[in-house]
Image: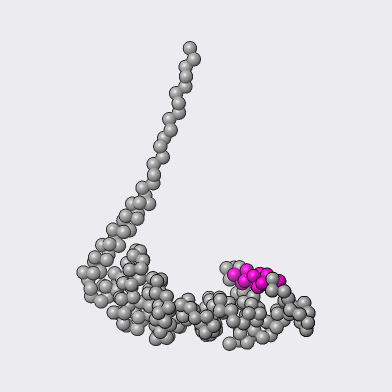
Amino acid sequence: MYALSLLGLFGFFAFKAFVKEPTKATASPSSLTAKLDKLWEIAQDSINERKYLRAERALLTILKVDERNATAYNRLGILYAKQKEYNDAIECFEIAQSLEPSASSLHNVGLIYYETGNYQKAAIAFEQALGMESGLPSRYIAYGKVQEKLKDLKKMTDAYEKAVELEPSPQMLRFVADAYARTDQHELAEKTLAVLTQMTTASSSHAKAAPRQQVQQKPAKRVVM
């Protein structure tokens, strides 16, 4: 990977900034922590401002100092994904997963595979992520979408149903209603749509029912005789 191949060159010069006397002693832990904190701040601000090259340099510098920082690899993967550099993004997420296994890393890998049309690998990554952390409805929605691409409508429906169990929101209900319709479960689709309509109507009515403010009457003026 070209970006990571620059790690040695760029990181070497950046690392020297942390060292007052390279051949004698390293910077104090508190000083190094402060510099790393500043780099994290630069990286996050740069990502928010879409200054991707600056963010990349900050993250690569962090990785030179702390080469086993899984969070930095994850953030770098997100950065590359935003720029559609998918191969680099996958490599970063996989490194992060090898250093510190997490559902987030696996889910991110799955999203990249989905984006690039590699649905089998996306499904495997999402399944592994769900095996580690199954409490987020968004993970089931992602898994359902990839199963839809793979034409496995039963797994798609099961995934959407699980998402609704975790979060019975209008968005989740739309997914499962559509799944029922596509699998010829029309009665379930109608019931789900009825619940969805009732939910959205109640929400709309609640929003319109603004609390009335009591009108305070001004005290009557005394008439001085």
Q: Residue at x 54, y 83 (%)?
A: 99
Q: Is residue 36 magenta?
A: yes
Instruction: State whether residue 50 appears in this view.
Output: no
133 relative position to 61: left or right: left
Q: Pinpoint residue 44: horizontal percent, then vertical percent.
A: 59, 70
Predominant secondary structure in magenta? helix
Q: Is residue 56 or residue 117 the one in the foreground?
A: 56
Seen from this angle, which residue lies furthest top?
A: 225
- Which stretch did the figure color magenta? 31-44
Q: On screen, 207 above or below 119?
A: above
Query: Measured from the top left, where is residue 37 in percent x and y?
Result: 64, 70
Q: Any magenta on residue 37?
A: yes
| Left or right position of 198 against 124 | left
- For image coordinates 45% across by 83% down, the residue present is 113
Residue 192: image location, x then y, percent:
27, 66
Quadrant for the N terminus, please.
Answer: bottom right
The residue that appears at 48% across and 78% down in the rendered structure is 102
x, y (%) of residue 32? 69, 74
Could you tell me if residue 95 is visible in this image?
yes
Dividing the picture into quarters, in which one does residue 11 lie?
bottom right
Question: Looking at the picture, does residue 214 appear above or below residue 219?
Answer: below
Farthest left residue? 187
| Camera-nearest residue between 156 and 167 | 167
Residue drawn at (47%, 17%), measured in percent from left and top?
A: 223
